[in-house]
Image: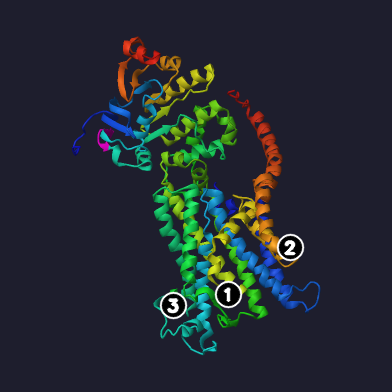
Amino acid sequence: MTPHILTRSLDRAATSFILIVAAVGVLIPLSNLLLPQGSIFQVPTYLVALWGKYVCYAILALSIDLIWGYCGILSLGHGAFFALGGYAMGMYLMRQIGSRGVYGNPILPDFMVFLNWDRLPWYWYGFDNFAFAALMVLLVPGLLAFCFGWLAFRSRVTGVYLSIITQAMTYALLLGFFRNDFGFGGNNGLTDFKDILGFNVQADGTRCALFLLSCLALLVSFLICRVVVTSKLGKVLIAVRDAESRTRFLGYRVESYKLFVFTLSACMAGVAGALYVPQVGIINPSEFAPGNSIEAVIWVAVGGRGTLVGAALGAVVVNYAKTLFTSGPLAPYWLFMLGALFILVTLLLPKGIVGTFNAWWEPWKAQRASADDISAAREDGISEPNPAE
Amino acid sequence: MNVMDTRATSAMLYLDGVHVSFDGFHAINNLSLMLAPGEMRAIIGPNGAGKTTMMDIITGKTKPDEGTVLFDGTVDLTRLDETRIAELGIGRKFQKPTVFESQTVQDNLLLALNVDHSVRGTLFWRGSKAESERIDNVLETIRLTGARNRLAGSLSHGQKQWLEIGMLLAQDPKVLLVDEPVAGMTDVETHLTAELLKQINRNHTIMVVEHDMTFVRELGVKVSCLHEGTVLAEGTIDQVSSNERVVEVYLGR
């Protein structure tokens, strides 16, 4: 009677999105590995890594859209969860360097030797194990989001106040990770990675595999988001977004719902960060910069808030533009362009790219549907109810 | 406050000696009111009489400074929050119609149904025949069957008011608190709303706050007049409207 949870979550746009991401995820690595160097169809390795980065950003954008677009929680500190996932992966990659570091210490990463530390801090234990590190990628951002959300949502901190404290959270982490004695490489962060699961991180094959995995992670995140937003829980989230106290008077525990999506979203952001780090080769405290989190919100606004597909699209489009413009003579003006883009989108396309497209498309679709409805109603002998105006 | 080990009262809603002040302003002053099970009560009173604040207290939005608020003779409502009170079976319609505008009429009712409201329950929710039948029934009662797939935001003002009453029906609470249900309605709509409330009253206790005297007269139920946060007069609409103090309050001193 009711469609299965997965089929329900796949409409036309969602299916097309999945097919496109899957195609890109397979074709780009294939072209890089199989076609001869110099062929016009061969995607060079640096582009594979660059697009891999975009895909990670798309996952981060999805995670923001899930809470902002559907539940009205505007987090301006989501970069923190992304960076924490990245650091967890970075710690694993640091431990894989082993004695190949500059100082040749088999246990301690270079920066610890440099700081004259004689043993590994306790919170670095276990990170030589990939499974443990992978677990931490989900657990650390998730746990932080859970504690933060538990306090904030229970105290009914909403709107701009919540946005401000999320900014404060990521800023506090930025300051913490900058300190050398914090034990995460200070200002320089973690870099000079060699291997991941025994494969050279610089090798074409590894790059392609990471790209494929990123696309896969994007698909899984997208599916999770779709299942959530098309379930009844999704309707409750929209209800909370539109009329929070009404939802409460219907008997929903609003804070539990917010906590659930906020934590889920933080875990997704963590995964995005973890896939990002081996592809860009470095993680440092600048990832915690409040500006990064705000930029991610702009991607979602540009692509279309509350559409999921739009969030991913916005992340890719804005970052592609960033790559394009910051490498040319216009580089010094990029931030102005980004600011202008945000203002223009807010003024001219308040629903973003996908939202605006839907606004054109939906009425046409609805017209067709209601034409069907009316003819069906006539057959049933039901007359149109009188409008109460 | 004494601990209730037996039913303190047979009333469905019982307010006694309730005080609330906001920054020194006494919004509710020694308010005492009782609603018998199955009763419908109309609450009238000039602006600022404390009608909405009283509903805020009953639904847990505002905590009283002192006084007793009991539901169903045993439950102390002053200790519970909005969600818990809603779960117990007190539903509320707001003064300004508050429906989920970006969702369909049908989904608004689905959200209001008194089924599992936990995160897990809604995530893995799958519709049942009983649920869709209940929604169909409510749609028919509130005359919105033809609009079931329309967005709630596109409804007329009167239809939104009805949808909100419909959400109360779907919630199926023991007590309905209805704040100004006919504000902004045409005469015909007002009449239909009175009929609707009478129909609902057959198996629910209702408290209606309303300014519209024609409407209150049409309901034909016991009326309490509130003034400066306390009950000024109680009785039939004729008794209350002929009460000298009530006339004085409405016309101004």
Q: Classify mark 2: residues with Cα within 10 Å, few (<14), some (14-19) or many (20+).
A: few
Secondary element under disc 3, as helix, strand or loop, is: helix
> Which residue appears at 57% of the width and 40% of the height?
B102
Query: Mark 1, chain letter?
Result: A
- Whichever of callouts 1 and 3 sits on the residue coming sooner in the sequence is 3
Please give the range of residues in magenta: B68-75
- In this rendering, the label closer to the viewer, 1 or 3: 1
Q: Amino acid at mark 1?
A: Ile
Of all chains, the one bearing label 2 is A
- Report how far apart the C-alphas of labels 1 and 2 lie in the structure: 26 Å
Q: Is residue B145 above or below residue A126?
A: above
Q: For residue A330, which numbered disc appears in the image?
A: 2
Q: Which residue is mark 1?
A: A282
In this orientation, does residue B125 appear?
A: no
- Tags 1 and 2 on a common chain: yes
Asked whether, in this view, residue A212 is left or right of residue B106, the answer is right
Q: Are marks 1 and 3 on the same chain?
A: yes
Label 2 sits on what residue type?
A: Leu
Could you tell me which secondary element the residue under label 2 belongs to?
loop
> Along the horizontal axis of the image, is B230 left or right of B166?
left
Residue named by callout 3: A124
| Labels 2 and 3 touching (C-beta < 8 A) | no
State the image coordinates of residue B5 (x, y, percent, origin top left). 18, 38
B218 up-or-down from A179: above or below: above
Residue at point 40%, 13% (across, down)? B251
Residue A76 spot, x, y in % from top left: 53, 56
Disc 1 element: strand
Q: Position of residue B221 (x, y in %)?
A: 36, 17
The vertical placement of A365 against B187, above or below, is: below
* Image location of residue A303, percent across then percent down: 65, 53
Q: Is residue A96 magenta?
A: no
